[in-house]
Image: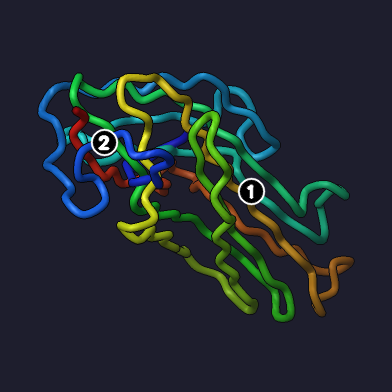
Amino acid sequence: MLGVFASALIAGPASAVGYLDLPVPPPTDRIVIDVVTVNGTGCPAGTAAVAVSPDNTAFTVTYSAYTALIGVGATSTDWRKNCQLNIVVHVPSGFTYAISKVDYRGFASLEAGASAIERANYYFQGQSQTAYVSHTYNGPFGDDWQSSDEIPIASLIYAPCGALRNLNINTELRAMAGTSDPKKTTSFISMDSTDGALNTIYHFAWATCP
C-alpha cells in the first residue's frame, strides 16, 4: 500500500498571488487526488495507496512491496528499486498548491560495511525536474529510518492556476554491499512495513489565484 502526506513544490512563471512570501490557510473544501499511473520495480500494481489528510494539508502514500536488497537471496537487479507516481490533485477554485516538505519512513537492516540510499525528486508536467535529494544510511544498522526533504519558500514550485497539471513524484532505494560479504550476508532497505504502518508523507503549501 502507499501513503502520502501533502507538501509544497516550486513555482514556474508566477501564476498565484503572493505565493512566494504569503502562504494561505488550506481550503476547507474537499480535495481529490487521482492516481494516473504508478510505475516502477518498487511499486508493482496493487502495492501503493494514496490518502488525503482530513485537514487538506497533506497526503500519504503507503507501500507494501518497496524493498531494495543485496546479498544472499537477492537477484542481480534487487539492489535498486524505484517508483514513479503520476497524480492529479483537484483543488477548489481560486487555490493552487506546492510541495513544501516530504517525510519518508521505512525500515533497514544493513550489515557492517554495507550502506543504503533513499532519494527523490518532484515536478509538475511541463516543468523542469527538481534536483534529487538523497539520504544515506550506513551499516551496521537495523532499525526504522526516517528522512525529510524541506523546500525553502523561495524555491517552492506551484501548480499553474486554472490548469490541471500532473504531479510526478520519483523515489528510489538502493542497497549496496560495500565492504560486507554479499555471498554470506543480506542487507536491505524498505519504504514499507509488514503491517503497512510506515508511510511517506507529502506536505502542501497553499496559495490563492487571481
User: Residue 27 at x, y = what percent?
Assistant: 14, 31
Pinpoint residue 1: horizontal percent, then vertical percent.
48, 33
- The reply to whether residue 72 is visible in this rendering is yes
Question: On the rendered structure, is 38 left or right of 100?
Answer: right
- Mark 2, mark 1: which one is toward the viewer? 2
Q: Secondary structure at mark 2?
A: loop
The residue that mark 1 highlights is 67
| Rendered residue at 31%/46% (across/down) | 203
Q: Nearer the viewer, residue 83 or 47?
A: 83
Q: Which mark is residue 41?
A: none
Residue 109 located left or right of residue 35: right
102 shown above or below 48: below
Could you tell me residue 37's position as x and y percent? 57, 22
144 versus 74 height, above or below: below
Secondary structure state at the residue bearing disc 1? strand
Of the numbered discs 2 and 1, the one sitting upstream in the chain is 2
- Image point 55% across, 66% down: which residue? 135
Mark 2 near mark 1, Cβ–Cβ under 8 Å? no
Residue for badge 2: 16
